[in-house]
Amino acid sequence: MPIIKVQRLVKKFANITAVNDVSFEVEEGSIFGFLGPNGAGKTTTINILCTLLSPTSGSASIAGHDCMNEPSEVRKAIGIVFQDTTLDKDLTAQENLMFHAYLYNVGKDIRKKRVEEVLRFIDLYERKDDLVKKFSGGMKRRLEVARGLIHRPKILFLDEPTLGLDPQSRANLWEFISELPRKHNVTIFMTTHYMEEAEVCSRIAIIDNGKIIALDTPSELKKAIGGDVVYIKTTDNLSTKQELERLFKLGVTEKEGELSMTCPMGDTCIPEMIRTIGDKVLSIRIQRPTLNDVFLNLTGKAIRDEEATGGDNVKESVRAYRRRH
Amino acid sequence: MEFNAIYVIVARELKKFVREKSRLFSAIARPLLWLFIVGAGISRLVPREAGVPYTQFIFPGILGMTILFSSIFSSISIIWDKEFGFMKEILVAPVSRFSIVIGKALSGTIVSLIQSVIILAFFPVVGFSLDGMQVLSVIFICACLSFCISAFGIVLATFYESYESFSVIMNFIIMPMFFLSGAMYPIRLLPDILRIAAHLNPLTYGIDAMKHVLFPDAQGNMAPDFSLATSALVILFSSLFFVVLAGKSFERKK
Ligand SMILES: Nc1ncnc2c1ncn2[C@@H]1O[C@H](COP(=O)(O)OP(=O)(O)OP(=O)(O)O)[C@@H](O)[C@H]1O
Ligand SMILES: [Mg+2]
């Protein structure tokens, strides 16, 4: 049973079509990724699903409830981490979480326990009484994810959860997120520009200019572009090249003293190579196609990996300035 | 209605109010400056009219001013919440828009009631001798008026997306509302157009109701303009109107 069903969704703003006839389904307990460049329509889709925006046409349902006609049932079923932080920076971590617990009518007897539990889960229990404005970007992001879990949603939406984090915090947060379906029994719908992150998804929709241009598992998507590239260094490149070409019936190219060939399944191909040319091999490495290659292949352009941090900081300080005056 | 949600929206506002002591300070300072500086100045021109000294005459107006500023400031903090994203956290929660509006309006009510009670405590300084019933009645009127103006402030906040609009609100809404409320001069002396505008201003009715309580025997120019019942009905219905309007404008964006 799919827990999210979207059919022919269209959203037009004045003169742009942000979401253009999008349909997909998300299975319960899976991680579903929306991958696309800036302005692809990811956030707009999320806003429609989480009942903040009405679509121009099409339908969407979450956990069996229609997003347009039963907003309050849908809201109960979901938790969200928006692209821009939505924490109250003038409240403490614990107060932000408590606010959420009350807002979602979490029972009186379990409120405190849940808040404490998630604070420990994200390793911020010691900082619970600090104002959120004193937190680092990574801490805020973790806090937001934790907040989204307090009311035990069936689905957690994550709109670019690792935006503006350094690689280390990104990896940490990502590890934390990928454990959620198992630990909290939640389905995850996430968006990202980062290829590496999307690889952890059960299924990925690649979206560009408001349209889904591919939708499959990461491995299938990669397979579609022709498999892995195996690089081999040998003691005798010339004879090995001929031998490999005879064996696999694939083209082998030589470049800078290294042989390379593209084979559909690198991992099964390597053992076979070793068996035939084993005594000549000096080194073997395998390069799997990344989703970046997939994207490049589908759209003819590399996904833009703009870090929004620079611009955001300017915006933040302008706001802070205004707030003080 | 979701009582937990209403409670926590109010609790958040009060927590922030208590933390920002400077906000309370300037909120109290403004009406006191008007009362003791502007009031004292003008009372040299109009020392006493129909048995009411000028500094006493403006006292209900100063209470109204306290309420006007603090209620609207409290409500348009919604614009901040929108700009900093916190509003989204509230809007995606399974809470009716109506409860959100009530929560916000009650926050404004409590904050401005606290401030107006502090100002009210200055009544002996301007020479009033009020009995307990009068004090309680004024506090009650302040509470109703605060709710009404807070609800109005929420309606305002729903029209604006960013804080740039703040000076527009200040100059074209708050100040005219104050000047056309009978706070500083009786509205019956105003030219027709301004008088009609004053009649459309909910603040006028709140201040007028307080005049009933504070100068029960005043005659002529200093007397209230409306009956207490009229003022009560206007405050009641405009509160309802603003709450419904605000709730509607929080609905999903098209
Ligand atoms: N409220 C709005 N009014 C007008 N246009 C909008 C609005 N919101 C989004 N858009 C437009 O819709 C398109 C899709 O925007 P959206 O925010 O969904 O992109 P996104 O995929 O989330 O991009 P990013 O990766 O930068 O967050 C963009 O062209 C954007 O300018
Ligand atoms: Mg986005």
Image (cartoon, coloured by chain):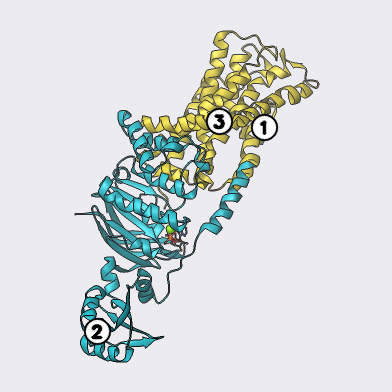
Chain colours: A cyan, B yellow
Q: Which is in the foreground here, disc 1 or disc 3?
A: 3
- Where does the image place residue B129, in percent across and percent down from the top left? 65, 9
Give the residue displayed 49% in from the left and 30% down from the top.
Answer: B107
Whether labels 1 and 2 share one chain: no
Q: Mark 2 points at which residue?
A: A277
- Where does the image place residue B7, in percent across and percent down from the top left? 41, 29
What amino acid type should be assigned to the residue bearing mark 2? Ile
Q: Mark 1 points at which residue?
A: B179
Q: Mark 3 points at which residue?
A: B19
Quadrant assignment for the N terminus of chain A: bottom left
* Rendered image quadrant of residue B251: top left
What amino acid type should be assigned to the residue bearing mark 3? Arg
* Rendered image quadrant of residue B62: top right
- Where does the image place residue B59, in percent across and percent down from the top left? 66, 20
Task: Report if the beta carbon of the residue with label 1 is closer than 8 angstroms to ligand 1.
Answer: no
User: Which chain is home to disc 2?
Assistant: A
Graded by Cα atoms within 10 Å as few (under 14), some (14 to 19) or many (20 or more), the crowding at tag 1 reads some
Say whether residue B238 is visible. Answer: no
What amino acid type should be assigned to the residue bearing mark 1? Phe
In this view, A191 is above or below A323: below
Q: Which is in the foreground here, disc 1 or disc 2?
A: 2
Q: How far apart are marks 2 and 3 (CA)?
A: 75 Å
Of residues A319 and A66, the one drawn nearer to the viewer in this rendering? A319
Q: What element does badge 3 sit on? A: helix
Give the residue displayed 64% in from the left and 11% down from the top.
Answer: B217
Q: What element does badge 2 sit on? A: helix
In this view, A70 is above or below B214: below
Q: Relative to A116, is B78 on the left or the right?
A: right
Q: Which residue lies furthest to the left in this view?
A: A1
Of residues B102 and B233, the one drawn nearer to the viewer in this rendering? B102
Q: Relative to A169, is B131 on the left or the right?
A: right
